Image (tube, helix red, strand yellow):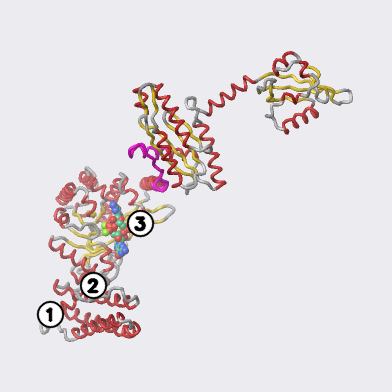
Amino acid sequence: MITDNKGAIIQVNDAFAGICGYSRDEVLGKNPRLFSSGRQTKEFYASMWHDLNKNGHWYGEIWNRRKNGQIYAVKENISSVFDVQGKPLHYVALLSDITLAKEHESELDHSAHFDALTNLPNRTLLADRLNQAIVQCKRKKQLLALVFLDLDGFKIINDTYGHLAGDQLLIATANNMQQTLREVDTLARIGGDEFIALLVDVGDMTACVPLFNRLLVAAAMPEPFNDVTLQVSASMGITFYPQTEEVDADILIRQADQAMYQAKLTGKNRCHIFDVALDNLTRSHNESLESIGNALAAGEFVLYYQPKINLRQGKIIGAEALIRWQHPDKGLLAPADFLPFIENHTLSIDIGKWVINTVLTQIECWHASGLNLPISINIGARQLQQDGFFECLRTLLAAHPTVKPGDLEMEILETSAMRDLNKVSELIENCREIGIYFSLDDFGTGYSSLTYLKRLPVKQIKIDQSFIRDMLHDTDDLAIVEGVLALAAAFSLEVIAEGMETTQHGEMLLQIGCDLAQGYAIAYPMPAAELESWASTWKPDTSWLDRPSFMRDDLPLLFANAEHGAWINAIENYLNSNFDTPRPNNLNCRFGNWLNTQNPDKRINLQAILPLHQQLHKLAAELIDLHAEGHTKAAFASFAELKSLQDTLLQTLKLLIQEKWK
Ligand code: C2E
Ligand code: MG
Ligand code: MG
C-alpha cells in the first residue's frame, strides 16, 4: 500500500485487496483509517507517526478490520519516502496477515492457563490470581478465602463407569460449582478431581459459611449418564488471608490442602477450616524439639544437685539431681522451660539416659574424693514405661562398677506410674531387688489413691511443695500434710517434705513428725562442683535440734496458730465487705475441741490459755454481729483489740508448746 504525504491511498496491489477484502477502486483516495478495528489506542497511532516522521520508518503489529467486519492482525513495515528537501512525499507499507499465527498463539496461551477438560483456570493461572488477590487484600485491607476441594468417591465412578463418565461428571461439577461463585472469584482445576476456589473480599469468616455450604451442595449434584446417575461429594479445606504471620500463595495452598485432608479424615462431605493458631503451636513445638535435640548433642544440659536432710539428726541423707539447660543465648533454663515439649517424644528417653549416665559418672567422682551420698533421679513417664528400662539401667550401672545400686534412687510421679500400673510395679520390684529404691514425687497433687499406694512398692513419699509452702498459714494444707504423714505411717513408708523454704517450716515439720526435708531453707540446687564444700560446711538450724514430735492427739495445739491466723484474716475481710457475704464461723475450732478434752490438772497448765481463748472467740463473735447489724465502724474500733488478743494467745501457745516438750 502506498499513500501520499496526507495519508490518502494511491496504490495497493492484489495481495493487499485479498487481505482486507476491499477492491483497489474502493480504497484509492481513502485514508487507511478505513481499516481501523478500534483495538489500537490514540497513543499507538501517535507513536507510529512520531517514528515515521523522525526515523523514516515504523515496524509493528496492528489489528485491523476487513470489509466483512472480521478482525485480522497484520505485521506492518512502513517507510517514508522524502523529497530533496527532506519533506515526506509518500508512505510505503508492506504488510502480511498474521491472524492465524495470532490465533494459534492465543490458543497456546489459553492452554497454558486453562484446563482443557473443564475450561477452568489451571494451577498456573490460579497462582497468578492468588498473588494478585494477596496484594489487593493488603492494599484494601480485605479478607480472602482459599478453598481446596477434593471430590469424594470420584475414583469409583471412573473405575465403574469409565473415563467418559468421569469426564462428564467433572465438567458438570465444575460448572455447578462455578455457578455458586461470584464473577470476581476464581474456580480452578488443579488436578484430577481437585479444585481450588479463590474467594476475594469475603467480608468476615462467618459471612462466607453459607457460600461454603453452597459449594458443598453444588459438588454433590447428581449428573445423569446413560441410564445411571452419577453423584459424588466434596471435602473442603479452607484457609484465610491475612493471618497473624505473613504467608505467601504457596503456604496458603498448602494450608487449605492440609485442612481438606482433615475434612476427609473426619468423614468427608464437609468443610474444615485450617487452624492457624494450632499450626503455629505445632511448628514452634517442632522447632523446640529440634533445638532440644541439638542441645543434647552439643552438651548444653547440666545437672544441679539439691541436698536432702534429716532435720532431727542434722544429717545430709542424699541429693536430688535436677536438670538445667545452659542455653547459649537464654542462660540457665529450668526444666519447666523445656521438659514439657519432649514429654511425649522419644527425646525424653535420650535425655533420661543422659541424666542417669551423668549421675553415675558424678557419683564415681564423688566416691573418689570421699563423698558418699545417694543421688535421686527424676524418671519421666515415657522413660518409666519404656520397654527394657530395667536392662538399660543395669547396663549403665555395669559401666560404672564403683557405683552400688544403693547409691541411686528414683523419683517418679504417681500419674506416670498409673499409665501401666502392673508394668511399673514390676519395674519397681525388680529395682528394689538390686537395691534401687523408688520415691513417689509431688505426692498429693495427683490421685493420691490408696490403691496405687498399696500396689506400688515404693519406699518413700515426697509431699508436694505446694502443701509444705503454705502449711504455716493454711489449715487445709497443714491438714493434708498431717494426713499424708498418717497415710505413710499406715503403709510403713518414709516421708520427705519438699519445698521447705524457712526454718519455721522445719520446726513445724519436726513437730508434726516429718523428719526428712529438702528445700531452699537448706540449700538451693547447686552445680555438682559446689556440693562437696557445701556438705562439709553446712550446719542445721539450732531450732530444729531436739524438737519433739507431738503425739497425734496433741496436734491441734500446733494447728492453733494457723487456725486462728486464718480465721482472724477472714474476719477482717468480712468487716471490709458488704453485709450479705457469709459470716466467718468458728464452730470447728480444732484447738477449742482439744482444750475441752484436756484434763486440767494433768499434763500441762491450761489456766492461762483457756480464758484467753474464750475471750478471743467472744470478742470475734461480737465484731461479726456488729458488722452484720451495720455497725461496721464500731466493729473496726475493736478489731485492734482482737489482734492483740490473738498475739497474746500465740505467745501463750508458744510457751505451752515449750513446756510440753520439756
Ligand atoms: P521435682 O522433682 O518435684 O523437684 C523439685 C523442684 O522444686 C525443683 O525444681 C527444685 O528446684 C524446686 N525446689 C526445691 N526446693 C524448693 C523450695 O524450697 N521452694 C520452691 N519453690 N521450690 C523448690 P526444678 O529443678 O525446676 O524441677 C522441676 C521439676 O522438673 C522437678 O520437680 C522434676 O519433676 C522435673 N525434673 C527435674 N530434673 C529432671 C530430670 O532430670 N528428669 C526428669 N524427667 N524430670 C526432671
Ligand atoms: Mg523430684
Ligand atoms: Mg516434687
Residue 260 lies in the magenta stretch: yes
Earlier residue among tags 2 and 3: 3
Distance from Cα at disc 1 to Cα at disc 2: 24 Å
Tag 2: residue type? Glu
Earlier residue among tags 1 and 3: 3
**Residue denoted by label 1:** 598
**Residue denoted by label 2:** 507
Q: Where in the figure is residue 257, as x and y percent of width and height?
A: 42, 37
Label 3, ligand 1: CB separation under 8 Å: yes
Q: Please provide the residue range marked out in magenta.
A: 257-281
Tag 3: residue type? Ala
- Left or right position of 478 against 134: left
Quadrant of residue 105 within the rendered picture: top right
Is residue 320 visible to us here? no
Residue extending farthest to the right is: 85
Magenta: predominant secondary structure element? helix
Quadrant of residue 59 within the rendered picture: top right
Is 276 in front, or is 422? Answer: 276
Does residue 233 sit above or below 523 in this rendering? above
Q: Find residue 180 and name its label.
A: none
Q: Find residue 334 and name its label.
A: 3
Q: Where in the figure is residue 478, as x and y percent of width and height?
A: 23, 69
Q: Where in the figure is residue 283, as x and y percent of width and height?
A: 40, 45
Residue 165 lies in the magenta stretch: no
